C-alpha cells in the first residue's frame, strides 16, 4: 500500500522509523534466560555485546556464561555469543534437555554435542564433567591442566556445520594457527550467517556416495589444486593400491580358469584314451591360462598379500620394485585371455577396466592422478571420512523468461553432506544427528545388479541386495519419518551397456524382469520411456518401480527417483536441481487444493536427465 502512495525513499524512511520505534522493540520481560526474565539493562547488554544473539524473539533461552554457548531452552546450542555477560540466572543442568550424563560447565549436553566431542577426540568415557572456556580449551572439573582445544582440530568446523552446531566466529587452536585451509573453503563464513537447506547424501559402498562422493567431487573436489600435498599423495597411493587389488582379482580368475581348462583336458583325455589317464597328463599339460614360473611367483606373492590384508602396507616400495613385473604380466597371453572374461569375475568392479588399461603408467613413481582418475577412483574421500559442499543455483536465461519470481533462488544456499556408512555408527545410531536436513538423497549403483562383495559375515553377497538392505534401514529410521527421499539411480551409462550382455535377472530381486523390446530400438541419447525405449531404459524404469514399491510398503509414502550418469556434470546438476524442485513443492503444496488443481499428482515422480 505504501509503495502505491509514496516513493521508495519515503517508504524506507518510514520502515526504519517503525523498526526503531520503542513500541516495536522486544519487551525484556518476554525474554527468559536461564529461567529468569530479563530487565531493560540486561537486554541492552545482550544487544550491545560484540557477538549478540541473532533473531532473538520472546521465549526461553539458556546461556553458558563461561563458554558463550546459547540456545533455546530444551534444545542444543544454536550460537556462541559473547561470554561473561551478566544476564539471567545461573545455568541449569537440564537447560538443553540432555541425556548423555556428560556435562559442560554444569549443563548436561545433548547427543549431538557428545558426537561432536567424540569426533574432536575428546575422551568422554566415564561420564566426565568438563570445564570449557570461550576459546574452546577444556579441562575436567577439579583439574588444572588444559587437555586440548575442541575447535582447534582440523575438520571440526566442517563437522559442526553439518551437525548444525555453532563454532566461534574466529576459531583458533593452541598455537593460534588458522583452521585447515581446505576445511575453511568447504565451510565459508556465510554458513554461519545464513540458514541453509541441507541435503544428506547416503548410499551403499560403490554407489557413488559412500567412500566415493561423486556429487561432491564433481562440483568441488575435481580441481587437484584444492588438495593438500599429503592428500594428493594419499590419493595416488589409493589408486595404485586399487590397481594391485584389481590385478589380484584377475590372477585369482586366472587360477580358476586354468583349473577349469585342465579339468576339461583331463576329461577329454580320459574319454579318448582311458589307458593314459594319470598324473603326468595333468602335470605337464599347458593351457592358454598358464603362466611361467617368474610370473607365477609374483602372482602367489600378491594373492598372499591380499589375503593377509596388508596390501596398503607395501607402498610405496611396491611401485618401484614390482612395476616392471606388472608390465610383463599385463602383456602375458594368459592374463589377456583372463581379461577378456572379466565379466565372469564377480568381485572385479566395472571401473577397473579404466585403470587396468593404464596400469603401467599409474604404477610409475612419478604418476600424478588426473581429474578423471579421481572421479573414477574407488575409496577417494576427505581425510576424516566426511564431505560437505555448499552451493547455489544460478538463474539461467530461460528461467528469466518463465519464472521471474524465482530469482531469489540465487540467494538461497544449499548444503550437500556426504558421510561414510561407518560414520553412521552401529545400526545407524548417529542418523539422529541429521534431523534438520531437508531431504535425504539415497544413491544406488545400477551397475551392481550382477556384482558381489563380501559382507560383514564374510559371505559373498549381491551388491544390489546389500543396497536394498541399507536402503530399508535408512528409510525406516525414526529420524526420517516425515522426510522426503530422492533415490538416485546412478551409473546409468554403464548399466545401459551391461544389461545388453548380462541379464538383469542375475539379481534374484529382479527375477520377474521380462521386458518386451521393440525391434525398432531407440538410440541411447533418447530418454523417453514412451517411444521405443531401449533395454537399458526399460531396466531403469523397472528398477525405479521396484524401489518405489519397497519404499511405499515400508513407509506408506511416495518415493522420488532420478536416473543419473554420475561422471557427467550436467547429469549431476540436473539431479540436484530436481531435489530443489521437490523442496520447493513441499513448501508450496499446502497452498494448492489437489481436487481443484488435478494436474498435481499425489504420487512421487521420476526424473531422467
Image (tube, grey):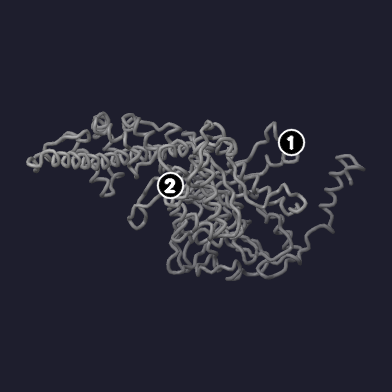
Q: Position of residue 307 (x, y in %)?
A: 26, 48
Give residue 529's quadrant in the image: top right
Query: Which one is nearer the viewer's eye here, 110 or 606?
Result: 606
For the C terminus, the image quarter is top right
Question: What residue does disc 1 label?
Answer: 402
Q: Is residue 584 left or right of residue 307?
A: right
Query: Which one is nearer the viewer's eye here, 359 or 175?
Result: 359
**Element under label 1?**
helix
Question: What residue does disc 2 label?
Answer: 505
Q: Is residue 317 left or right of residue 225?
A: left
Q: Is residue 576 left or right of residue 204?
A: right
Query: Which one is nearer the viewer's eye here, 501 or 163?
Result: 501
Query: Which one is nearer the viewer's eye here, 255 or 294?
Result: 255
Q: Position of residue 436 (x, y in %)?
A: 60, 56
Rendered image: mark on residue 359: none
Residue 516 appearing in the image: yes
Give residue 87's quadrant in the image: bottom right
Residue 524 appearing in the image: no
Q: Residue furthest front?
A: 272
Q: Is residue 388 left or right of residue 258?
A: right
Q: Earlier in the sequence, mark 1 or mark 2?
A: 1
**Element under label 2?**
helix
Q: Position of residue 49 (x, y in %)?
A: 68, 55
The residue at the point 73 percent across, 65 percent down is: 31
The residue at the point 72 percent across, 50 percent down is: 588
Amino acid at each position: 500500500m505504501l509503495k502505491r502512495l509514496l516513493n521508495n525513499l519515503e517508504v524506507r524512511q518510514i520502515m526504519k522509523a517503525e523498526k526503531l520505534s520503542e513500541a516495536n522493540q522486544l519487551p525484556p520481560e518476554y525474554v527468559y534466560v536461564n529461567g529468569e526474565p530479563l530487565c531493560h539493562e540486561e537486554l541492552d547488554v545482550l544487544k550491545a555485546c560484540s557477538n549478540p544473539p541473532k533473531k532473538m524473539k520472546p521465549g526461553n533461552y539458556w546461556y553458558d556464561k563461561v563458554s558463550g554457548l546459547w540456545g533455546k531452552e530444551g534444545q542444543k546450542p544454536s550460537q556462541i555469543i559473547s561470554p561473561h555477560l551478566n544476564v539471567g540466572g545461573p545455568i541449569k543442568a537440564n537447560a538443553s534437555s540432555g541425556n548423555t550424563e556428560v556435562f559442560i560447565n554444569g549443563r548436561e549436553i545433548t547427543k549431538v554435542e557428545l558426537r561432536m566431542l567424540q569426533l574432536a577426540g575428546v575422551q568422554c568415557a566415564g561420564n566426565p564433567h568438563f570445564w570449557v572456556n570461550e576459546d574452546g580449551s577444556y579441562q575436567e572439573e577439579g583439574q588444572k591442566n588444559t587437555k586440548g582445544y575442541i575447535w582447534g582440530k582440523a575438520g571440526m568446523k566442517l563437522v559442526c556445520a553439518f551437525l548444525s552446531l555453532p563454532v566461534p566466529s574466529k576459531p583458533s587452536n593452541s598455537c593460534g594457527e588458522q583452521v585447515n585451509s581446505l576445511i575453511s573453503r568447504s565451510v565459508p563464513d556465510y554458513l554461519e550467517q545464513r540458514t541453509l537447506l541441507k541435503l544428506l547424501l547416503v548410499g551403499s559402498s560403490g554407489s557413488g556416495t559412500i567412500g566415493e562422493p561423486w556429487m561432491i567431487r564433481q562440483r568441488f573436489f575435481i580441481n587437484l589444486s584444492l588438495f593438500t600435498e599429503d592428500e594428493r599423495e594419499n590419493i595416488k597411493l589409493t589408486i595404485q593400491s586399487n590397481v594391485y587389488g584389481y590385478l589380484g582379482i584377475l590372477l585369482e580368475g586366472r587360477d580358476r580358469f586354468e583349473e577349469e581348462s585342465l579339468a576339461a583336458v583331463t576329461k577329454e583325455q580320459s574319454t579318448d584314451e582311458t589307458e593314459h589317464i594319470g598324473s603326468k597328463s595333468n602335470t605337464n599339460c599347458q593351457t592358454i591360462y598358464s603362466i611361467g614360473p617368474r610370473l607365477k611367483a609374483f602372482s602367489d606373492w600378491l594373492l598372499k598379500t591380499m589375503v593377509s590384508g596388508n596390501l596398503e602396507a607395501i607402498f610405496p616400495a611396491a611401485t618401484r620394485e614390482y612395476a616392471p613385473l606388472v608390465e610383463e604380466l599385463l602383456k602375458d597371453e594368459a592374463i589377456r585371455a583372463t581379461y577378456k572374461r572379466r565379466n565372469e569375475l564377480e568381485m572385479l568392479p566395472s571401473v577397473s577396466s579404466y585403470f587396468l588399461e593404464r596400469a603401467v603408467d599409474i604404477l610409475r613413481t612419478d604418476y600424478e592422478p588426473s581429474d578423471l582418475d579421481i572421479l573414477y577412483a574407488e575409496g577417494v574421500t576427505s581425510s576424516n571420512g566426511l564431505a560437505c559442499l555448499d552451493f547455489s543455483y544460478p538463474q539461467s536465461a530461460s528461467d528469466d523468461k518463465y519464472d521471474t519470481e524465482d530469482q531469489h533462488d540465487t540467494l538461497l544456499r544449499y548444503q550437500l553432506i556426504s558421510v561414510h556408512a561407518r560414520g553412521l555408527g552401529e545400526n545407524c545410531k548417529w542418523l539422529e544427528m541429521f534431523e534438520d536436513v531437508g531431504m535425504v538423497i539415497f544413491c544406488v549403483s545400477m551397475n551392481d545388479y550382477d556384482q558381489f562383495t563380501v559382507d560383514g559375515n564374510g559371505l559373498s553377497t549381491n551388491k544390489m541386495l546389500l543396497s536394498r538392505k541399507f536402503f530399508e534401514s535408512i528409510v525406516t529410521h525414526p529420524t526420517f519419518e516425515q522426510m522426503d527421499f530422492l533415490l538416485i539411480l546412478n551409473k546409468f551409462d554403464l548399466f545401459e551397456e551391461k544389461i545388453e550382455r548380462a541379464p538383469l535377472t542375475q539379481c534374484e530381486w529382479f527375477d520377474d524382469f521380462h521386458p518386451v523390446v521393440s525391434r525398432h530400438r531407440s538410440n541411447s541419447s533418447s530418454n523417453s520411456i514412451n517411444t521405443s525405449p531401449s533395454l537399458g531404459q526399460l531396466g531403469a524404469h523397472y528398477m525405479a518401480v521396484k524401489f518405489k514399491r519397497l519404499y511405499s510398503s515400508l513407509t506408506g509414502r511416495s518415493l522420488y527417483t532420478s536416473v543419473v550418469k554420475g561422471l557427467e556434470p550436467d547429469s549431476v546438476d540436473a539431479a540436484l536441481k530436481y531435489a530443489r524442485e521437490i523442496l520447493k513443492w513441499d513448501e508450496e503444496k499446502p497452498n494448492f487444493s489437489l481436487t481443484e488443481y488435478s494436474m498435481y499428482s499425489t504420487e512421487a515422480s521420476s526424473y531422467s536427465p
